[in-house]
Image (spheres, helix red, strand yellow):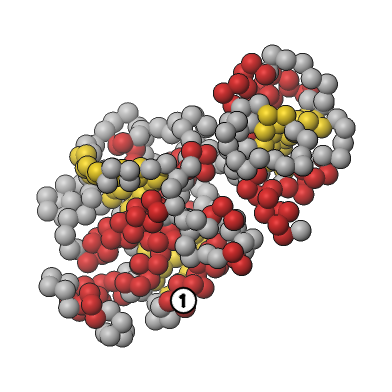
Amino acid sequence: MSAERYNRQIILKGFGEEAQQKLLRAKVLVIGAGGLGCPALQYLAAAGIGHIGIVDDDTISLSNLHRQILFTTADIGKLKAEVAGKRLQEMNPQIGIIRHPIRLQKNNILDILSRYDYILDGTDNFESRYLVNDACSLLNKPLIFAAVSSFEGQLAVFNAPDHSTLAPGTNYRDLFPEAPDKGEIPNCAENGVIGVLPGILGTMAAAETIKLITKIGQPLTNKILNYNLLTQEQYIINISHGNGYTLPKTVDDFLNMDYQDTSEAPQGYIEIDASELVKLQQLESTILIDVRERHEVPVLDKQIYTQVPMSEFAAFLNKDFYQKQVVLICQHGIRSVAAAEAMQEKYGDAKKIYSLKGGIVKWRDYFLKS
């Protein structure tokens, strides 16, 4: 270990060489190399965390760059986990970086999480949050949680005993016992987010991780911090142990839990990529429907399409149209899935329903690369 690299934190009163050695021995897994994960990864690597794992199966898009600061325009189309790992290794060659360019699912998450001491969740969908929470509970792994939307963010530490009282830790289900229905609550991909906000919350998540490892200060165990960027106000709410939910007690319990996998389309409609959409557009029997609200950008230039915002979609389903193949699109392929489910319920086998995976963001990336 290079003492000079970490000198400014080693000389801190109450920190010292002992705390730095704890960081060097620690194994931290960051789930999601996005707006939250990027700043968290940078500061964890710079602080000297000895072993850092990165989980992300996604590729870099142009719309990522205003907040995912490990990436550049030249990285578009590359795997986030691979690019992030390379940047961190360049920043600090003394630490170990393990890349996991995969999607966490029931059949692999326990194996991966078991290799680490601390888990930092920077995901942006509810399915992943409940999956990660329950896996951490089963494996007894401390979970550092951060979330952002629009101009607000949240931060908490789950499944870790309180440093001062030793009270057992709460978990994400103590706040939200069950996942909301798909599409009920938009994530930042659909709701938008100001770029600096995940930087703030991601850095704070890194700080909570360092506090847990070194046992300095008072981590946000059994508490959740709420932050408003517009007013710079923040407040902390105590979390109590709840009931009315079930946590898995065994591996079999965990494998039998219902975690909706958003990577697989429900039976009845098909998710397609941009190249498949281009082929479908050549058919006269295909109608392209944009379910974004009318104020959303980018506008689909040079495209023949019908705009039916989700707020008007129920009324649209009462109308007749002749096309037999329907392709639904939105910004990130989330609302289009909800629209596809509604159309499938309405029309059954009478029409072929498609949803564009990754939405307009991935569609634009496809044309930028082609």
Residue 98 pos. (x, y %)? 48, 69
Compare residues 118 and 39 and report the one nearer the observer: 39
Q: Residues within 10 Å of mark 1 (few under 14, many from 20)?
A: some
Compare residues 30 and 327 and report the one nearer the observer: 327
Kind of element beneath mark 1: helix
Please identify the residue farthest to the top as the structure is shown.
318
- Can residue 353 be seen by looking at this rendering? no
Residue 220 pos. (x, y %)? 23, 50
Identity of the residue drawn at 22% across and 66% down: 214
**Image quadrant of residue 293?**
top right
**Image quadrant of residue 15?**
bottom left
Left or right, residue 223 beside residue 113:
left
- Can residue 241 be seen by looking at this rendering? yes
**On screen, 90 above or below 194?**
below
Compare residues 294 and 237 and report the one nearer the observer: 294
The quadrant in which the C terminus is found is bottom right
Check disc 1 and give the amino acid type: Gln
Left or right, residue 366 beside residue 16:
right
Q: Which residue is mark 1?
A: 89
